[in-house]
Amino acid sequence: MKILIIGLNIVLIILFCADLFLWLTAFASGHAIPSKTYWSFLLSSLFLILAIVGLNFWSRKKSN
């Protein structure tokens, strides 16, 4: 179970980094990005952060 949690945590962190990279490249290009795209990047980043924190909290609680 511990290996599954660690693997899932790594996958979530990689997805978060990819999301941030895409957000930076989209907004650094200087084009007019629609606000819907901005909100989709924001919500996906928040979801991934909450998933990472929740998984870490759950794994620590389960180990005790």
Image (cartoon, helix red, strand yellow):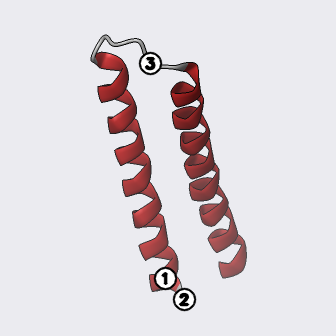
Q: Is residue 11 above or below residue 40?
A: below
At numbered mark 1, what does the secondary structure look like: helix, strand or loop?
Answer: helix
Labels 3 and 2: the sequence-earlier one: 2
Q: Is residue 31 left or right of residue 7?
A: left
- Percent coordinates x, y for residue 2 in the rendering: 51, 84
Of the residues tagged 3 and 1, which is closer to the observer?
3
Q: Residue at x 60, y 63 (%)?
A: 56
State the separation of the CA atoms marked 1 and 2: 5 Å
- Front residue of 61/49: it is 49
Crowd around label 2: few <14 · some 14–19 · many ≥20 (10 Å): few
The N terminus - image quarter: bottom right
For badge 3, the amino acid type reads: Ile
Which image quadrant is residue 30 in? top left
State the separation of the CA atoms marked 3 and 1: 37 Å
Instruction: Write down the residue under mark 2.
Output: 1
Is residue 33 visible in the rendered image? The answer is yes
Instruction: Write down the residue under mark 3.
Output: 33
- Percent coordinates x, y for residue 39 in the rendering: 60, 29
Instruction: Write down the residue under mark 1.
Output: 4
- Percent coordinates x, y for residue 33 in the rendering: 44, 18
Determine contact: label 1, label 2, CB under 8 Å: yes
At numbered mark 3, what does the secondary structure look like: helix, strand or loop?
Answer: loop
